[in-house]
Image (cartoon, rainbow, N blue to C red):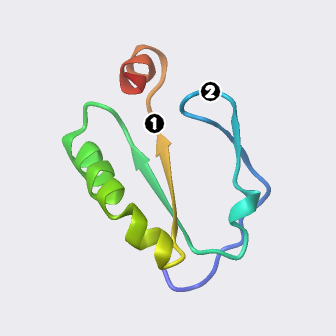
């Protein structure tokens, strides 16, 4: 994706509780990644993004992982 897409004001539930505002990311490139616990590809991607976090941040790229888990699988993912 080369073109910029506007991001509407959005509040997301934080993984550890509370709310997370994405408005503070305005003007910054953002990589939104979807993941689900128990999916090896998703978990591998999170590990690689975590290892690269300092470099991505230094390059000005914000990473927002969105969990697709719900119910019991969400509780397991939080562990």
Q: Name the residue at the top extreme.
A: 72
Contact (Cβ within 8 Å) of mark 1 with mark 2: no
- Total number of numbered discs in the rendering: 2
Q: Position of residue 67 (x, y in %)?
A: 46, 38
Indicate whether 18 appears above or below 42.
Answer: above
Q: Indicate the secondary structure of the residue bearing disc 1.
A: loop
Residue at position x 77%, y 60% from top? 8
How many neighbours does mark 2 have within 10 angstroms: few (below 14), some (14-19), or many (20 or more)? Answer: few
Viewer-proximal residue, 74 or 62?
62
Q: Quadrant of the C terminus?
A: top left
Q: Position of residue 43 (x, y in %)?
A: 27, 43
Which one is closest to the eye, mark 1 or mark 2?
A: 2
> Which residue sits at x=69%, y=30%?
18
The circle on residue 68 is 1
Residue lying farthest right?
Answer: 9
Compared with 68, 10 (above or below) is below
Q: Quadrant of residue 11?
A: top right
Q: For this rendering, which residue is in front, 72 or 62?
A: 62
Q: Name the image quarter holding residue 29.
A: bottom right
In the rendered image, residue 53, in percent from the top left (x then y), is placed at: 40, 62
**Mark 1 or mark 2, which has the lower sequence index?**
2
Instruction: Say few, some or many: other residues with alpha carbon within 10 Å of mark 1 (under 14 / 14 to 19 / 20 or more).
Output: few
Q: Which residue is mark 2?
A: 17
Which residue is painted at 36% across and 37% down in the image? 36
Element assignment for label 2: loop
Seen at 45% across and 36% down, the residue is 68
In this rendering, position of residue 13 left or right of residue 32: right
In the rendered image, the residue lying farthest to the left is 40
Q: Real-space Cα distance between discs 1 and 2?
A: 15 Å
Image spot of residue 47 (x, y percent): 27, 50
Vertical relation: 30 (above or below) 68: below
């Amino acid at each position: 994706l080369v073109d910029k897409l506007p991001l509407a004001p959005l509040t997301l539930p934080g993984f550890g509780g509370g709310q997370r505002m994405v408005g503070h990311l305005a003007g910054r490139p953002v990589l939104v990644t979807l993941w689900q616990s128990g999916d090896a590809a998703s978990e591998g991607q999170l590990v690689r993004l975590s290892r690269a976090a300092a470099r991505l941040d230094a390059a000005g790229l914000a990473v927002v992982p969105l969990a697709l888990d719900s119910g019991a699988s969400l509780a397991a993912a939080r562990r």
